[in-house]
Amino acid sequence: MGACGGENEAGSNGGNADDGKITMGFAQVGAESGWRTANTKSIQEAAAAAGIDLKFSDAQQKQENQIKAIRSYIAQKVDVIAFSPVVESGWDTVLKEAKDAKIPVILTDRAVDSKDTSLYKTFIGSDFVLEGKKAGEWLVKEYQGKTDTVNIVELQGTTGSAPANDRKAGFGDVIKADPKFKVIASQTGDFTRAKGKEVMEAFLKANPKIDVLYAHNDDMGLGAIEAIEAAGKKPGVDIKIITVDAVKDGMTALAAGKINFIVECSPLLGPQLMDLAKKVVKGETVEQRVLTEETTFTPEQAKAALPDRKY
Ligand code: GYE
């Protein structure tokens, strides 16, 4: 497995060089969470298995870095560009540059808000609104028949990202039907454990009565658990916790009763991405939207699933 393509193609940088091998430039969001680590591994392994030459960059959660990486992939004339846009807005210019260079683009995991859908070939990933709804539905069931106010704090993902926007919207949509549910604080924890802990500490200081934490990913929930325990409270009991992702550390905390419910979001997008890339490079038409299949987990279900959990 050669690291860089184009070695036997004199003067070429891989990419459109007609060596039969597809070169993909992938601009990753960063390494902010367990989900992201599993996603990166899935993409790297699937590329190797599919014989695709992968150029990979980590944008450290900064849009400007992703734009730079995409421009460099365009300059290198890769065959296909794939990326997971850190935020939803601000992509039209660089996507237009790729289109003008006739390099197909595939969105993975997160969406863009571009009106012109001809700027990318397809978008593969989860339905984040549905994930938020599943979180809300669990809560509604959990507090069925009760009338007391339920004080909720929310740890949002990266500001402006599709999963933060949509998980907030889906959850809000479901719980607004019952006025006993009150979101008393909602702030970003940037999808990281450290920020989740820090923001939860502030929530705990400012709010004497918190019944529920809804965290947009496991990592922020895990950080918050540290803050809750440090404040002398029992996570999962004194404060009920709902998270999204279902990575191993999250599932372990769920099985231990520190988290009460996890909505699954699959990071294993690699194999499907490589299939789509091959089709798109051949000029075949593909579906504009490819959805990931996902479930939810209770503590009992987490216990059963953990032994086989790959990430
Ligand atoms: O939930 C979170 C990660 O975009 C679905 O990003 C992804 C989210 C995931 O940092 O853990």
Image: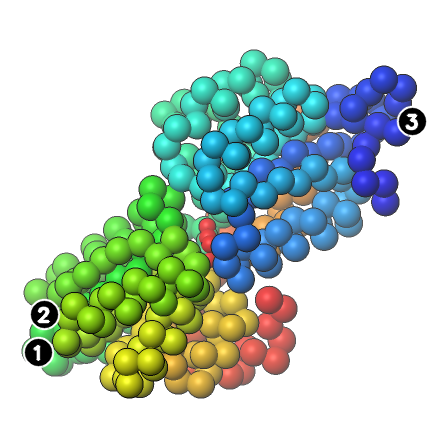
Q: Residues within 10 Å of mark 3 (few under 14, many from 20)?
A: few
Residue at the spot of label 3: 8
- Return the residue nearer the eye: 54 or 130: 54
Q: Name which residue lies at 56% across and 14% down.
A: 100
Marks 3/2: CA distance? 67 Å
Q: Amino acid at mark 1?
A: Asp
Residue at the spot of label 1: 148
Which structural element holds mark 2? loop
Q: Determine if residue 243 is in view.
A: no
> Residue 221, percent across and down?
38, 68
Mark 1 vs 2: CB contact within 8 A: yes
Q: Name which residue lies at 66% across and 20% down.
A: 75
Marks 1/2: CA distance? 6 Å
Q: Nearer the viewer, mark 3 or mark 2?
A: 3
Residue at the spot of label 2: 180
Sequence-wise first label, 3 or 2:
3
